[in-house]
Image (spheres, rainbow, N blue to C red):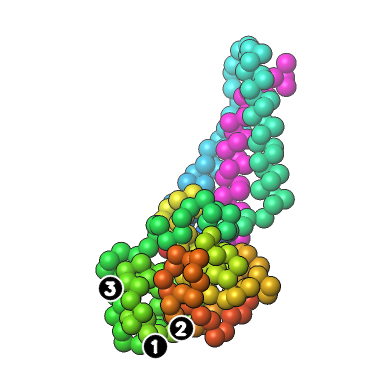
């Protein structure tokens, strides 16, 4: 009967302890940003510390309801809960945190969300007009492309882009997006943004989800199958390491 009381009584405490420890470990390792927006770091860490205090209090507390009987159904649910908890804990320890990839892009339309506001896009247009291209981010260029596809606006403008490769659904052989995810609250609501790049048979040299940095100008899309009016034709395209902060905020 002691095992039954242990499972039912301490399941919540153990669950809280695991969640708190994982949160603190992610914060210490600088990986909390793979799950939530940086604006919530302080709040999350404070709540984790408070949770840890409650866990310690629960472990020190000695209940007086040892005689309380538990049903078979409660026992089964507790056992299942502990097994699920063990699997999740093992997965968090064995499998390192990773960023979202093309698999998620395929589930969410690229550039359908996460684009800058009209004010941000206007600021980006001013920078582009002044020739200050180095200050323009991937998000800025993606925003500009959603505002206008007039080739004359992009004439003579050079973009420097970094992100991961996500094949374009309409022409995956010759066009890919240099993409990133915009996180508003957490990774669950992340929206993919990207700029289309034209490079024939790009997958002979690069792989999907590989991080790259490209420099090039905008040209009318030579692909008849693609829905993107303009693409970047890279003058340089080099593989890079995934940055410590891969998301856009």
Residue at image position (53%, 60%) is 169
Dividing the picture into quarters, in which one does residue 75 lie?
A: top right
Specify the principal SS of the magenta part: helix
Dividing the picture into quarters, in which one does residue 124 lie?
A: bottom left
Is residue 216 or residue 222 the one in the foreground? 222
Residue at image position (37%, 85%) is 155
Label 1 secondary element? loop
Query: Is 151 drawn above or below residue 83 in the view shown?
Result: below
Residue at image position (54%, 54%) is 106
Task: Using the numbered discs, state the Cα–Cα distance from disc 1 to disc 2 in whole angstroms.
Answer: 7 Å
Q: Earlier in the sequence, mark 1 or mark 2?
A: 1
The local crowd at label 1, few if under 14, some if 14 to 19, many if 20 or more residues have their Cα within 10 Å, is few
One can see residue 34 in this view:
no
Q: Are marks 1 and 2 in contact (CB under 8 Å)?
A: yes
One can see residue 237 in this view:
yes
Q: Badge 2 is on which residue?
A: 217
Residue segment shown in magenta: 1-30
Q: Earlier in the sequence, mark 3 or mark 2?
A: 3
Q: Earlier in the sequence, mark 3 or mark 1?
A: 3
Q: In this view, does 22 lie to the left or right of 93?
A: left
The local crowd at label 3, few if under 14, some if 14 to 19, many if 20 or more residues have their Cα within 10 Å, is some
Q: Badge 3 is on which residue?
A: 122
Label 3 secondary element? helix
Q: Quick check: is 24 in the magenta stretch?
A: yes
Q: Which numbered disc covers residue 38?
A: none
Q: Badge 1 is on which residue?
A: 156
């Amino acid at each position: 009967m002691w095992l039954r009381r242990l499972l039912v009584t301490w399941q919540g405490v153990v669950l809280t302890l695991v969640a708190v420890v994982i949160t603190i470990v992610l914060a210490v390792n600088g990986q909390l940003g793979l799950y939530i927006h940086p604006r919530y770091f302080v709040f999350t860490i404070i709540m984790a510390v408070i949770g840890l205090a409650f866990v310690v209090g629960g472990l020190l507390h000695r209940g007086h309801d040892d005689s309380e009987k538990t049903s078979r159904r409660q026992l089964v649910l507790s056992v299942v809960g502990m097994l699920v908890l063990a699997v999740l804990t093992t997965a968090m320890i064995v499998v390192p945190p990773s960023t979202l990839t093309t698999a998620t892009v395929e589930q969410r339309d690229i550039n359908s969300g996460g684009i800058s506001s009209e004010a941000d896009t206007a600021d980006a247009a001013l920078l582009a007009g002044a020739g200050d291209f180095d200050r323009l981010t991937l998000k800025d260029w993606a925003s500009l492309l959603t505002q206008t596809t007039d080739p004359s606006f992009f004439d003579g403008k050079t973009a420097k882009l970094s992100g991961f490769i996500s094949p374009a659904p309409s022409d995956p052989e010759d066009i890919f997006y240099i993409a990133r995810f915009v996180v508003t609250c957490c990774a669950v609501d992340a929206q993919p943004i990207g700029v289309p790049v034209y490079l024939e048979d790009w997958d002979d040299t690069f792989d999907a989800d590989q991080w790259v940095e490209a420099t090039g100008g905008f040209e009318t899309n030579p692909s008849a199958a693609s829905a993107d009016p303009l693409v970047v034709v890279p003058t340089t395209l080099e593989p890079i390491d995934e940055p410590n902060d891969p998301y856009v905020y």
